[in-house]
């Protein structure tokens, strides 16, 4: 009986691992596999049985610069290029969120969380599960440090070439709409950020 339980546990873990998730591979509109010569062209993803899971109408393309965006094949999830941004997509074709760009690439995870975008706003996802932990509701959001992150609901974005810096309409305001504040890893308000910090 004990051996049966161990065997069932092993089989369950094995088939739920990323290596055994359904593999999808990219194809061009003409049904051929993508090559290095097909950069920037529309793609669709099919499973091993040839069924289209992510159709051409989803709008994904091969990436002209970084091949790890819109990869030739993937198992559980991948970053797919949609022509202007990069979506985090699972192997069922569901778009979870977009990349938050920082330092010329995907945001670095800090304290187990990384920043993501949805509808032009910033939130946080788990480094381990890739699921959204703090919904995207901020116009400005910094990485977590010592269990807290500096955020603002409204901010003007200025790009410095390496990442982002923000300026607020009124850094001394006393309402959440116009001022930086700290949140914890559950997205709860901790304290105000004072102008000199």
Image (cartoon, helix red, strand yellow):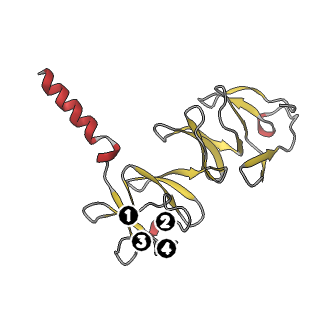
**Residue at mark 3 to residue at mark 4: CA–CA distance:** 10 Å
Residue extending farthest to the bottom is 30
| Occupied quadrant, residue 195 | top right
Quarter the N terminus occupies:
top left
Residue 35: mark: 3
Q: Position of residue 180 (x, y in %)?
A: 78, 35
Tell which tag, 2 or 3, sits nearer the viewer. Answer: 3
Between disc 4 and disc 2, whose residue precedes? 4
Which residue is outermost to the top? 2
Whether label 4 touches label 2, CB < 8 Å: no
Front-most of 116 and 161? 161
Neighbourhood count class around disc 2 (C-alpha, 10 Å): few under 14, some 14–19, many 20 upward: many
For the residues marked 4 and 2, what is the alpha-carbon distance in whole angstroms?
A: 8 Å
Lower position in the chain sequence, tag 1 or tag 2: 1
SS at badge 3: loop
For the C terminus, which image quadrant? top right
Q: If you read the primary sequence from the N terminus, does the residue marked by circle 1 or circle 3 appear first?
A: 3
Marks 1 and 2 sit apart, C-alpha to C-alpha, by 9 Å
Numbered badge on residue 41: 4
Q: Is residue 121 left or right of residue 49?
A: right
* Tags 2 and 3 touching, CB below 8 Å: no
Residue 72 lies left or right of residue 96; in this view the side is left
* Tally of marks: 4
- Label 1: which secondary element: strand
Q: Residues within 10 Å of mark 1 (few under 14, many from 20)?
A: many
What residue is shown with label 2? 60
Considering the numbered disc 4 on the image, is that residue within a helix, a strand or a loop? loop
- Residue at x-position 67% and y-position 50%: 103
**Disc on the earlier residue, 3 or 4:** 3
Mark 3, other Cα within 10 Å: few <14 / some 14–19 / many ≥20? few
Q: CA distance from mark 2 to mark 3?
A: 15 Å
Q: Any mark on residue 45, and which?
A: 1
């Amino acid at each position: 009986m004990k051996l049966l339980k161990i065997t069932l546990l092993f089989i369950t873990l094995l088939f739920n691992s990323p290596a055994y998730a359904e593999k999808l591979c990219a194809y061009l509109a003409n049904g051929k596999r993508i090559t290095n010569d097909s950069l920037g062209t529309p793609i669709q993803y099919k499973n091993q049985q040839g069924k289209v899971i992510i159709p051409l109408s989803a709008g994904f393309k091969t990436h002209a610069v970084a091949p790890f965006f819109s990869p030739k094949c993937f198992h559980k999830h991948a970053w797919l290029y949609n022509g202007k941004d990069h979506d985090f997509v699972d192997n069922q074709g569901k778009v979870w969120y977009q990349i938050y760009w920082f330092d010329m690439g995907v945001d670095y995870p800090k304290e187990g969380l990384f920043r993501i975008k949805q509808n032009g706003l910033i939130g946080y996802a788990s480094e381990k599960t890739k699921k959204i932990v703090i919904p995207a509701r901020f116009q400005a959001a910094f990485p977590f440090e010592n269990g807290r992150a500096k955020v603002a609901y409204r901010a003007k974005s200025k790009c410095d070439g390496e990442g982002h810096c923000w300026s607020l309409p009124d850094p001394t305001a006393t309402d959440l709409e116009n001022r930086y504040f700290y949140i914890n890893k559950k997205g709860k308000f901790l304290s105000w950020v004072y102008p000199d910090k």
